[in-house]
Image (cartoon, rainbow, N blue to C red):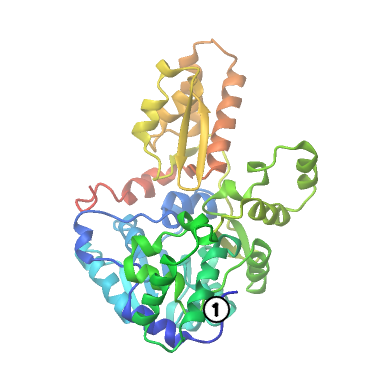
Amino acid sequence: MNRRGDNSDQVRAMYESLPYPARDPADEDRRLVRTSLDYLPKISHYGFAGRLHQRRPLRVLVAGGGTGDSLIFLAEQLRRVDAELVYLDMSEASTEIARKRAARRGLDNIRFSVGSIDRINPDEYGYFDFINCSGVLHHLPDPDAGLSALARVLADGGVIGLMVYARYGRTAVYQIQSLIDTLSDADEPLPARMDVAREALDALAPGHWWKRSEELHTDHKRYGDAGLADLFLNPIDRAYTVPELYDWLERCGLDLIDFADHRLAYDPASYVRDSTLAQRIAGLSRKQQQAAAELFSGTISKHTVYVKGRGSTASTARPSAEMIPVAAFELDQAKLVRDFNPSASGQNRTVEKPGARLSLPVNPISTYLFRSLDDRNDLGAIKSGLIRESSGQAPDHWLTDQLDALIELLVRADMLYLVDSHEVGNWLERTRPWPHPLNP
C-alpha cells in the first residue's frame, strides 16, 4: 500500500534537489507563515496546563525542520524571551533556506544542525521542553527509532508536537503512488518520474478516488515540483490508523495528550445522531471512539497530536477564574465582534477555522465573550462583566453556566485556548509575532 524500506539516501537526495516546502527567503519581508502546531498559547494550553511561562529558559527543538516554517514561527514568538531553538534536518539545501529566512528576519536565537533525527542524543543536544516533528517520521526507514530518539531528549514535563500521515484519508494518494510505480522504475531520474506523475493524473477516469478526494491533498498545487514529489514520489511513505498511532506511541514510551488539529473529526458525536448507535459508542474506550470517528470520517489524511513521556506531569489547561481565553490565530476576531453584534440577536452565525465549523446563536453570552477576547480578561473578569451587563435580566448562575458551556465548546473545537493570567505579563505579550515590522 505505501512505500517502505531503507531508502533514506534517496529521501535525502530528493530533498536536496527539491527542498520542501518551496520557500523564497525574500518573502519574509512581507509575511509570516503561521503553523497551528507551534502557536505558543496552544502549546501552553495542551501540554503545560496553561503555564508554559514557568519553564525558563525554554529549549525548543525543531526536528526535521525542512525549509523552516515551524522554526521561523516559533523563533518569532520567542524573539524576546529567554529561549534557545535548535533546528535539525538531514538536507543541507533545506537547512540553507531556513538559515536565510532566519537571517532575513534578524533571528539570532537559533542553532542550526544538519543530521539525522534517529541519532540525536542528550549528551550532544541536551533536553527540550517542546519538540516539533511535523511530517518527518513517516519518511524514516525506522520511525520507531526516530520517535524513541526524540523521547530520550524530551525534558521532564516536556511535550512533543507530531504530525504523521493518516491511512484512510490518503487512500487515493497510495493508488496514485502504485500507478506511478507501475509505469516507471524507481531508479529513473526524479524529473522523469515527475513527468509520469503529471501525465498519470491527467489520464485518470472521472470517477477515480483521486478525483473525488483531491481537495484533501493540495501540496502539489501549493508548492509546485517540491509538493508533487513529496506527495507522490517519496521513497519512504507510511501512514497510521488511530489504533496504530496509539500502539506506536506506546512502543516508544510516549502517551497521547490530545489531537492538536481537526479535533472534532475524532469525536464520534460529530457524525452519529442515532441514539442506539450513540449508546454503543459510549461504551467504547477513548481510543476506540477515536478509531471509530476516523472510520466515520474517511477523510482524515494527517494525524496531528501533542504527546508526552510516560508518567509525565504534562497536562491540558482546565477552566478557572485566573485563566485567560486566547483565540486561535486562524479566527478573525474583528469579524467575530461584527458578526455577534447585539443587532443580530436571535440569529445564528458561523465560526470556522481549518478543520472546524460551528453554528452559534447570537445572544448576550456569545456577544460579550467575543468582545472580551483581548488576551487580558481572565475568565473571572469575563463572568463578572457579563453579570454586570445583564443587570439582573437573568440569574447569575444561568449566565455563568451558559458561558462555561460556550467556552467548553470552543475549546473542544480547537478555537480557544486557556492560559494562566501570569502568561500575559511574563510571556504572551512579548511573544506576539505580529507587532514586528516584518509581520504586517
> Residue 275, located in which quarter of the rendered image?
top right
Q: How many marks?
A: 1
Q: What residue sits 50% from the left and 61% below the top?
A: 210
Camera-nearest residue between 107 and 57: 107
> Residue 60, located in which quarter of the rendered image?
bottom left
> Residue 274, located in which quarter of the rendered image?
top right
**349 in relation to 310, above or below:** above
Camera-nearest residue between 313 and 278: 278
What amino acid is at disc 1? Answer: Arg
Q: Position of residue 8 (x, y in %)?
A: 47, 85
Q: Position of residue 336 (x, y in %)?
A: 40, 31
Q: Where is residue 198 in the image (x, y as percent from the top left)?
A: 38, 70
Q: What residue sits 59% from the left and 65% below the top?
A: 167
Camera-nearest residue between 294 and 341: 294
Q: Where is residue 394 in the image (x, y as percent from the top left)?
A: 57, 13
Where does the N terminus fall, quadrant-wise? bottom right
Q: State whether residue 57 appears in this view.
A: no
Disc 1 residue crowd, few under 14, some 14–19, many 20+, Cα 10 Å: some
Side (left or right) of 439 relative to 397: left
For mark 1, give the secondary structure. Answer: loop
**137 in relation to 425, above or below:** below
**356 in relation to 153, above or below:** above
Camera-nearest residue between 10 and 61: 10
Q: State whether residue 411 appears in this view.
A: yes
Q: What residue sits 50% from the left and 73% below the top?
A: 177
Label 1 sits on residue? 3
